[in-house]
Amino acid sequence: MERWHISLSTWLRDYLYFPLGGNRKGKIRTYINLIVVMTLGGLWHGATWNYAVWGIFHGCGLAVERLLGVNQTSKEIQARSNSFWQQFLLDLIRWVLIFSFVSIGWIFFKLVNFDAAIDFSLL
């Protein structure tokens, strides 16, 4: 029996990211594809500027994450590191930064309009 239900992330990957070329057309094109797909994912949630900015924000975050190699597994990073505590500290810093980034992004998603998001973020 085949499943007829598909998650939004799977749909974005299979029907937008892969047809755009995914990561097979070079690094710059990969970053552009990530931003485009996340922007369209934001617009899927609502056709207002705050959702588009939310998508662009997350797309840029994914592009920067890929550019800096943050998405490497802990084992790949740990293979280069001798200290457990050094790795633990790096993982903790990475977790705090990613959590902060995503939390700031939720401002644009949750507030009623873009002007309110800008006002809230400037406080």
Image (cartoon, rainbow, N blue to C red):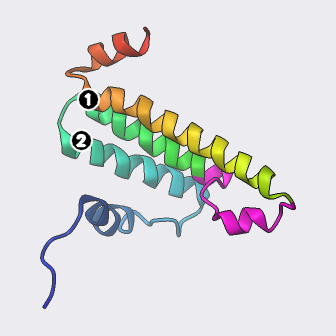
Check the image and name the residue furthest to the front. Answer: 85
Type of residue at label 2? Leu
How many circles with numbers are drawn on the protein? Answer: 2
Point out residue 111 in the picture as x, y percentages from the top left corner.
Answer: 25, 23
Point out residue 96 in the picture as x, y percentages from the top left corner.
Answer: 57, 38
Point out residue 22 in the picture as x, y percentages from the top left corner.
Answer: 45, 65
- At horizontal 17% and vertical 37% (from top left) the residue drawn is 46
Do residues under tags 1 and 2 come within 8 Å of each other at their CB atoms?
no
Mark with earlier residue (1, 2) = 2
- At horizontal 28% and vertical 28% (from top left) the residue drawn is 50
* Residue, disc 2: 43
Check the image and name the residue furthest to the right. Answer: 82
Give the Cα separation between the discs numbered 1 and 2: 14 Å
* Residue, disc 1: 110
Report whether 77 appears left or right of 3: right
76 drawn magenta: yes
Where, by quadrant of the figure, is residue 121 drawn? Answer: top left
Type of residue at label 1? Lys
- At horizontal 66% and vertical 55% (from top left) the residue drawn is 69
What segment carries the magenta color? 66-82
Where, by quadrant of the figure, is residue 55 drawn? Answer: top left
Q: Which mark is residue 41?
A: none
48 drawn magenta: no
10 Å crowding of disc 2: few (<14), some (14-19), many (20+):
some
